[in-house]
Image: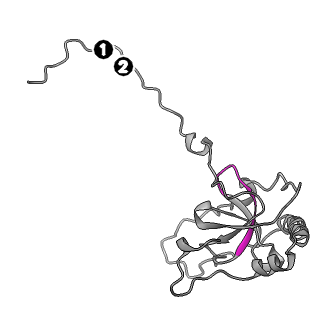
Amino acid sequence: YQNKPKANFPTKRFVKKRPSKATFNTHKRNVRSNLKPGTVLILLAGRHQGKRVVLLKSLSSGLLLVTGPFCLNSCPLRRVSQRFVIGTSTKVDLGDYKVPQNLDDAYFRRLKINKQKKSGEGDIFAPKKERFVPNEQRKKDQKEVDTAVLKAIKAHPDGKFVAKYLKSMFALHSSQYPHRMKF
């Protein structure tokens, strides 16, 4: 069976309609069912790995907004991927507390610094990398959120134990397997 050439060729080329590029950031993000606001999470990766934090809300990008509270374990307001957390059965009832509207993905986005083009000679006085320093707005928001979370922790029947639990770090020792544990 030979492939015969087409008997007729279309005179006009039809342009296939393709979906726009922005489909990835508009699609619906699903959050694991055990990750509800007020749940205590264990961070598994990043700068604060091993710390226990309180989940505040899930953002539109699919990331989770968590806080330490900062005064308990020095974990600030930050976005975390749900892939890198373990949801525990410990819950802090945040009640009717609503997280401020300005705490969204744009709030946490880092500003990119424009890189200077390299000149012919090697840069002897290379600029040092600037460390991230939180601004006053971020400090104010951190305090506001932390007061609400600490109030909820104190209202918990085992408030003292929950505070100690959040202060303590998570670590595995020999013959401890996370898939066999109940968190």
Q: Position of residue 125 (x, y in %)?
A: 60, 81
Q: Between residues 50 and 183, which one lies in front from this camera angle? A: 183
Instruction: Give residue 13's mark.
Output: 2
Residue at horizontal 53 percent and vertical 39 percent from the top: 21
Residue 152's image quarter? Answer: bottom right
Tag 2's secondary structure? loop
Tag 1's secondary structure? loop
Which of the image's four quarters has the C terminus?
Answer: bottom right
Q: Where is residue 106 in the image (x, y as percent from the top left)?
A: 73, 54
Rendered image coloring scheme: one colour
Q: Where is residue 42 in the image (x, y as percent from the top left)?
A: 66, 72
Q: Where is residue 94 in the image (x, y as percent from the top left)?
A: 85, 61
- In this view, 55 is above or below 21: below
Residue 13's image quarter? Answer: top left
Which of the image's four quarters has the N terminus?
Answer: top left
Instruction: Give residue 10's mark.
Output: 1
Residues packed near mark 1 inside 10 Å, few (<14), some (14 to 19) or many (20 plus): few
- In this view, 161 is above or below 33: below
Q: Between residues 114 and 171, which one lies in front from this camera angle? A: 171
70 relative to 120 in the view: left or right: right
Q: What stretch is highlighted in magenta?
A: 52-63
Q: Between residues 59 and 155, which one lies in front from this camera angle? A: 155
